[in-house]
Image (cartoon, helix red, strand yellow):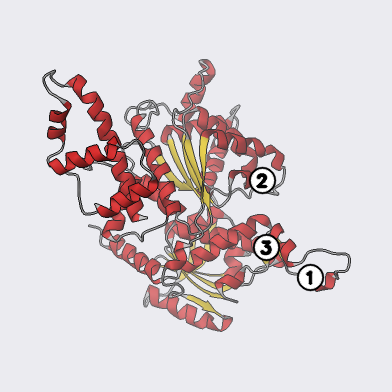
Amino acid sequence: MRTLARALLKARTFSRARQGLHAAPNKLDKSEKKSDWLARSFSKPSQIKEFKRVFDARALSLRSLSSYAENDSTQELDGVDAGKRGPLYEYERRVSSGELVDGDSFQVDTLQLLQGLYDQLVENEDKCRLDRYKASEKSGRSRWLWSRLMPQSSSYSPVKGLYLYGGVGTGKTMLMDLFYDQLPSTWRKKRIHFHDFMLSVHSRLQMHKGVEDPLEVVAGEISDESILLCLDEFMVNDVADALILNRLFGHLFSKGVVLLSTSNRAPDNLYEGGLQRDLFLPFIATLKERCTVHAIGSSTDYRKMTSAEQGFYFIGHEYSGLLKEKFQQLIGKETPGPQVVEVVMGRKLQVPLGYNGCAYFSFEELCDRPLGAADYFGLFKKFHTLALEGVPKFGIHNRAAAYRFVTLVDVMYENKARLLCTAETSMAELFERIVTVADAQKISPRTSSRSLKKDDVDLCVDNELGFAKDRTISRLTEMNSKEYLEQHEASLRESAHPG
């Protein structure tokens, strides 16, 4: 993939240089020829020859690009690559420095799209009103009030967004972060997990009760803060979210918001089998209209390429004593005690034992109670490590707890938190009784001669949970890897000794 990425970079650079070559004579003195311009633009004769060789050809196939980059990988074109920015360039730099493992062609295809989105945003910075210092200073509510007095036309962005979806561990989040990290700091942008985004939306709706259209006010506030919205792990399993998404994003898109999102599900499969899904379908059409939809077809789970299961995942209830011992080692000689975490809208979460960024819960206390993403986000704003005792094997009898555990792992992964736990069985076996409808039909097809007694009575057929379980297992694997835990320790040291 590194060879292919380098080829794409050189082709992009040469393409821009060629455009400059055709435009140059209009800006030059009449006595200056294109050959003179070439001499000024490229310091070496070999570079001029190479430039002409590449672009005199009428077409270049992907194979020839790859071959060219391989043969000339050590040759740099002085001055041509200087100052180039974007996810494709940054990817090449990180692979060269050893920060990233070389990926596959599926990631290259995605990087091309992300680089294209980056270039379009840079080119249309003013039209998209991306620079926060040039944008209006009106608040969302005052803008809403002004729009009531002076109705304004919609202002859709000239740039389409991007919706990336694919299997677990294929690098979606990494690629989004690679893109986001290259954006100018002055832009109105936000990168946020979808769970956290929707919690913020519901919180804002509470604040604007009583107005005619609170969703429009909320959309105005969000667009004032962030014209470019990057949502990680787009997943809809809550009817309250499903029923407002079309109107919310209808307002956001009409206010010029550009969306970049990642998901495990294709747009057409979002909220599959959900309550009142017919009211959700218009959102899918809106999403596909305003975003380019791209599937990352890789079957490689890069999370599982780490040195897996080197961490604190202990199988068997008999290890609860060891879990407490490890927890005590992390907090030192101090005695942990009950603590309280502020969540949202006045809610509070009771922490049974906590000290110095480390919290201890039983599974029942954290996942067998009516808690949700808001509680977990609140918890990990205060704590960086969780010791969780007694994770069970999931099935139909504890499906609600399984959903909460999936959400808990998502929030921990998003916050780069550390997990210590005891579990009834291995990571792979935790969810083996959770299946999609398609998987259930393969396991136990119903026939007239089949006895109900032969069915697994604890089998849970749930499409959303059936898809989510692979992501959870993948993330648990990475969170227990040597690399993840070393990064966590490094982050703690950096926080303790900034600068």
Where is residue 100, by image quadrant? bottom left
The quadrant in which the C terminus is found is bottom left
User: How far apart are the two marked residues, 3 and 1, measured between alpha carbons?
Assistant: 14 Å
Q: Residue at x 60, y 48 (%)?
A: 236
Report the disc number at residue 239: 2
Residue at which label 3 appears: 435
Where is residue 334, by image quadrant? bottom left
Residue at which label 1 appears: 455
Residue 307 in percent (x, y) is at: 41, 72
Q: Amino acid at mark 1?
A: Asp
Q: Residue at x 12, y 40 (%)?
A: 43
Q: Secondary structure at mark 1?
A: loop
Circle 2 packing at 10 Å, graded few (<14), some (14-19), many (20+), is some
Residue 55 in percent (x, y) is at: 28, 36
Front: mark 2 or 1 = 1
Would residue 386 be visible to someone looking at this image?
A: no
Residue 196 in percent (x, y) is at: 50, 48
Front: mark 3 or 2 = 3
Left or right of residue 247, residue 69 in this image = left
